Each structure stands twice: as C-alpha cells, then as structure tokens.
Image (spheres, helix red, strand yellow):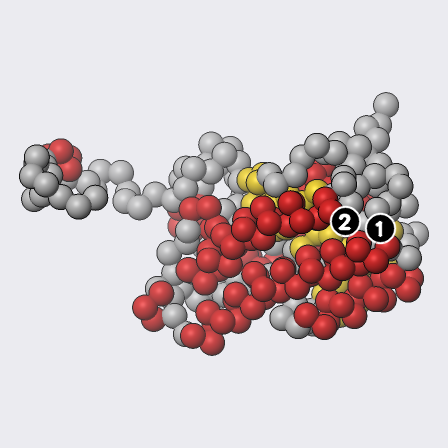
Amino acid sequence: MALETGLAGRVVWITGASGGIGRACARAFADEGARLVLSAGRRTEALAAFVRDELAGADALVTGLDATRAEDHERVVEAALARFGRVDHLVANAGVWPAEHAPLHALDPVRLAHTLAVDLVGVAFGARAFAAALARTGPNASGGASAVLIGSTAGRFGEAGHADYAMAKAGLVGLMLSAKNEWVELDPRARINLVEPGWTATPMAADALADDAAVQRALATTPLRRVARPDDVARAVLTLSAPALSAHLTGQTVTVAGGMEGRLLFEPGTIDADAARSPGRGSGDEDQDR
C-alpha cells in the first residue's frame, strides 16, 4: 500500500525550480498530486519547457523571480493566490554558489553582498511573503502549512574559500528557529524545517565535481562515499513537507550528505605526531584568560 502524504491538491511554491534540486522537488510533489508554483531566476522558458515535457498533467504556474527583491516574492505570491487561492507549502531552494575560491581577506565585497542577498536575505523574503499569505488565507483545514529551507553542509562545517556561502547558509538556522515560533500564531499546525545537502550532482556543482581530486576531498569523511543525487534531497524535502508524514517535526535540520562529518584539514601522514603531543607555550599551570 502506498504511503499517504496528504499533499494531494495542496499548493507548493518552489523557488529555484529550474535547478537540479528544484526540478527533482517539482517532480516529487507533482507525483503526489500537489499543485505547483515554480519560480526561477533567468531560466523561466526552460522551466516552462520542463513542466510541459516532464510534468504533463501537473497543475503548475511558472513565474520569474528576482530573489533579491522582496516585492518580487510578493508578486509571485499574489499570482499564486489568484490562480490557486492559497499557498500551503514553501520550498526555499533559490541560491547561488560562486565557484571561484576566494579567502575572506580577498573576497570581493560585491560578491559577498550578492551571495548574502540571494542565499540568506532572499530566503527570508520568500518566507516573509509565504507567511503573509498564510496570515491572509488562514490555515488549510486538511493540515498545517510548512516550509523547507534548503541550506548546505557549508553552513554546518564552513567552507574555506566560500565564507560568503557558508555564512548565508548558517544564517538560515536562525530564520528557521524564529519562524517556527511565530508561524503557529498564524496556523497552530504550521511547521518549518531545514535540509542541508552536501555535495550534490546538480548543474551548479558540475564544474567542481568534474575534478576527481575535489570529489576525493569531498568524500574523505563521508561513510556512504558517493555524491548525492537531486532525488535524494527531494525525498527529504517532500517528507518534511508532508502533513501526513511529519506533522510533529518543526525547527529541525536534516543533513542529506551520506553521513559527512566535515572536511579533512590535513592529509593523513602529514602531521608531526611528536610535535602534536608536545605542550606548547602557555599550556602549563600559569594563570590565563580563557
């Protein structure tokens, strides 16, 4: 017997829907009979073609979205309300990952501001517009509203050369933990959770994953020893969104990264064990500020 999710007929807004994870989420929710609001930045025509060719029969609204503009999120919500009457679920997936390795002291301030504007502030704008719609329409009688924010293992472990991305993704935790306490005033069954993918085989990561050495480093502390597929992430998102599966899960972080524990800082065999065991200056019993 198929597992009931409670998503049939419900309205799901997916941002960044033209990317690998976004498309996988769109397929997963369409398979459950959800109605879709699919937003993309520059690739709206490709997204519309994807809906036509691969989601035949799905009730879907395709929109553009500038993630850095609050009014753009509000415009998408107005279009969704006009088409469907409400928005029940948000999957905040829109994001950027600047590929160039740049340590913080050399990081272009324009890049830093833009990454934060898309990956953190833009997600907050989406959550804000979603909550405002919920305040207008009230709860869905068939189950609570929910949001899933797409974070990253970079927000948990950091990522050298990509502090802007790691900062933005780490900030989503504060957004989630605040919204989970606010949204129950709008809908007593409203929920919000965070999914942290690790390295995932998406177009955004394709160039980085083409480097065998980079893949080796990425998987060096990953027990399952493979890069995630977009469907791996989409299934976690769907489970956390589904009112019949996760009705009592909110404020939680699910890491979809094969058990990753972080990145190796040093290759095995390169550490001087004797020096590592020797106490350094200031390690004795003298008073120190700690």
Circle 2 packing at 10 Å, graded few (<14), some (14-19), many (20+), is some
Q: Secondary structure at mark 1?
A: loop
At horizontal 53% and vertical 36% (from top left) the residue drawn is 258
Residue type (three-letter) at the residue carrying disc 2: Leu
> In this orientation, which residue lies closer to the viewer: 107 or 73?
73
For the N terminus, the image quarter is: top right
Residue 43 image-quadrant placement: bottom right
Q: Is residue 90 left or right of residue 260?
A: right
Q: Which mark identifies residue 62?
A: none
Residue 133 picture location, percent across and down: 80, 58
Instruction: Tell me what residue is drawn at x 76 percent, y 68 percent.
Output: 74
Quadrant of the frame with the C terminus: top left
The reply to whether discs 1 and 2 touch (Cβ–Cβ < 8 Å) is yes
Work out whether 224 lies above or below 237. above
Q: Is residue 248 visible?
A: yes
Which secondary structure lies at badge 2? Answer: loop
Residue 18 in the image: above or below residue 90: below
Give me the disc on residue 138: 1
What residue is drawn where x is 63% and y is 60%?
A: 124
**Left or right of 14 in this view: 208:** left
> How far is disc 1 from disc 2 in space, using C-alphas?
7 Å
Q: Position of residue 87 (x, y in %)?
A: 82, 54
- Local packing at callout 1 (Cα closer than 10 Å; few below 14, some 14-19, many 20+) is some
Q: Is residue 281 left or right of residue 14?
A: left
* The one of 219 and 158 positioned closer to us in this rendering: 158
Q: Left or right: where does residue 195 sit relative to residue 184? A: left
Which residue reaches farthest bottom?
110
Q: Which mark is residue 186?
A: 2
Mark 1 / mark 2, whichever is N-terminal: 1
Kind of residue at badge 1: Gly
Q: Nearer the viewer, residue 90 or 162?
A: 90
